[in-house]
Image (cartoon, grey):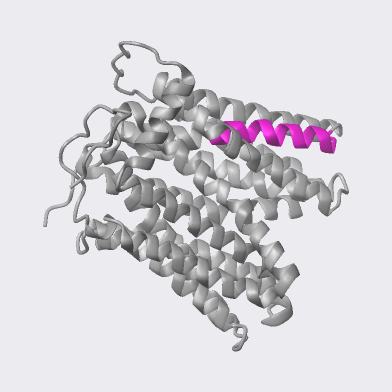
């Protein structure tokens, strides 16, 4: 079998910018709470507020940003988003160097920077199909996820090390430089010109069109529902994992950190393996590996209630990392293939909202379950939730998909969805 030709240089520039953006984001996400504690001396309530500020824009702005991506130049949108993030990081650096950083300022800059992150997260998947041929979408999304997994492993570790050994200002300087490199790449990104819309619909009508298309589509609907249920289960686990691992399994903070690193390594291995797997498995089978891994991981973690073993925890977190990346790569490619380009920003934003909106639901479910029945039942409930996401995926047409559809989807209509093969 001959090697595939390289992906277009414009996509390489976009994927490199995405990797740099995610690296800067993860660096800053690790450095911000550490700086808040070490430099500003805040407590748990303040760090929780910082977490809220850095995630709230995903819930509030993803769908409006999807509409903007569909209506305006994706290049300007991506470039503007990254420049906004660069300005906020540079502002934190300046305040740190001047000794003028306060917690309200860090909170506000974290919120503004997260707005840029949301915009970029919506813009990238909506831009890829304009740069890559349909048959190369899985390969293209593999590179996007490879950059994401690498950033998720290296960013927090580097951010923590820089804050610990050379100070918070250095960590934010590095993040700013990385973010600036992404801006430089995006400034040279050439995208095909989209045809102008014949008429501009009202915003609410346009948003409703994207929502109806996604929720009526026989493939997009189970994708959204499966991802939402998965994230409820994942954050149900996340909410109680630290207490369970230390108090029940007997793990130390160091071995808990290893478990989180194993999850990132699983995602990285998955991104490397997807090309080999996609050549041997139908696309539907490749997608279903993700929900299966989620359920197996939840069962492994629940088993530590009776067999308190850190090795079992490592295996569970490896699966938590490996499966979702396979799911993300394959379902993103299918979503891009079946969604008309003028709707892709809105559909991608709906995926982001369903993913991030599910996270507080999972954490809230953990809080209620733990208060009423005890921590052990949170892990049991997680198995039930992960079983539900697998059932939703298996009951849909997703497992029957053998390959990406060859024909471009018809222009969107509010009355129906494009058929998939």
Q: Give the residue displayed 34% in from the left and 50% down from the top.
A: 331
Q: Give the residue displayed 57% in from the left and 46% down from the top.
A: 357
Q: Give the residue displayed 54% in from the left and 81% down from the top.
A: 312
- Residue 157, given in percent of the width and then of the height, sits at 62, 56
- Which residue is nearer to you in this view: 295 or 11? 295
Q: How many marks?
A: 0
Magenta stretch encompasses residue 114 = yes
Q: As displayed, is residue 228 above or below residue 312?
A: above
Q: With 255 as the anchor, is 330 left or right in this view? A: left
**Residue 167 seen in render:** no
Q: As displayed, is residue 275 above or below residue 74?
A: below
- Which residue is nearer to you in this view: 185 or 55? 55
- Residue 152, given in percent of the width and then of the height, sits at 54, 53
Magenta stretch encompasses residue 370 = no
Q: Give the residue displayed 75% in from the left and 68% down from the top.
A: 371
Q: Which residues are magenta?
A: 101-118
Magenta span: chief secondary structure: helix
Q: Quadrant of residue 284?
A: bottom left
Q: Quadrant of residue 378?
A: bottom right
């Amino acid at each position: 079998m001959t090697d595939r030709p390289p992906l277009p240089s414009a996509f390489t520039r976009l994927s490199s910018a995405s990797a740099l953006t995610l690296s800067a984001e993860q660096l800053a996400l690790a450095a911000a709470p550490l700086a808040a504690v070490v430099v500003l001396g805040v407590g748990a309530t303040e760090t929780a507020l910082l977490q809220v500020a850095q995630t709230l824009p995903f819930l509030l702005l993803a769908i409006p940003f999807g509409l903007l991506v569909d209506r305006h130049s994706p290049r300007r949108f991506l470039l503007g988003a990254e420049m906004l993030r660069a300005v906020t990081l540079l502002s934190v650096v300046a305040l740190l160097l001047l000794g003028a950083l306060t917690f309200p300022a860090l909170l506000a800059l974290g919120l503004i920077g997260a707005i840029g992150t949301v915009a970029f997260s919506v813009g990238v998947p909506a831009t890829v199909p304009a740069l890559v041929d349909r048959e190369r979408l899985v390969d293209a999304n593999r590179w996007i996820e490879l950059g994401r997994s690498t950033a998720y492993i290296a960013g927090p570790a580097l951010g923590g090390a820089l804050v610990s050994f050379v100070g918070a200002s250095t960590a934010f300087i590095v993040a700013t430089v990385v973010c600036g490199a992404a801006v430089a790449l995006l400034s040279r990104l050439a995208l095909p010109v989209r045809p102008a819309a014949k008429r501009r619909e009202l915003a609410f009508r346009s948003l409703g069109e994207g929502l109806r298309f996604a929720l009526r589509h026989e493939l997009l609907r189970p994708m959204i529902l499966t991802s939402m249920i998965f994230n409820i289960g994942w954050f149900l686990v996340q909410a109680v994992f630290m207490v369970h691992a230390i108090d029940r399994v007997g793990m130390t903070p160091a071995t808990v950190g290893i478990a989180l690193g194993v999850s990132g390594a699983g995602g990285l291995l998955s991104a490397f393996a997807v090309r080999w797997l996609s050549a041997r498995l139908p696309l539907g089978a490749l997608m279903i590996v993700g929900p299966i891994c989620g359920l197996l991981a939840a069962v492994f973690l629940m088993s530590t209630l009776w067999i308190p073993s850190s090795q079992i925890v490592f295996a569970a977190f490896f699966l938590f990392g490996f499966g979702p990346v396979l799911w993300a790569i394959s379902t993103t490619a299918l979503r891009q293939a079946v969604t008309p380009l003028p709707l892709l920003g809105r559909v991608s934003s709906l995926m982001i909202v369903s993913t991030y909106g599910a996270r507080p639901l999972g954490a809230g479910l953990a809080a209620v379950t733990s208060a009423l029945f005890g921590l052990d039942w949170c892990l049991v409930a997680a198995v039930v939730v992960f079983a539900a996401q697998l059932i939703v995926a298996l009951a849909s047409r997703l497992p029957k998909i053998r390959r990406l559809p060859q024909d471009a989807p018809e222009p969107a209509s509010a009355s129906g969805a494009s058929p998939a093969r």
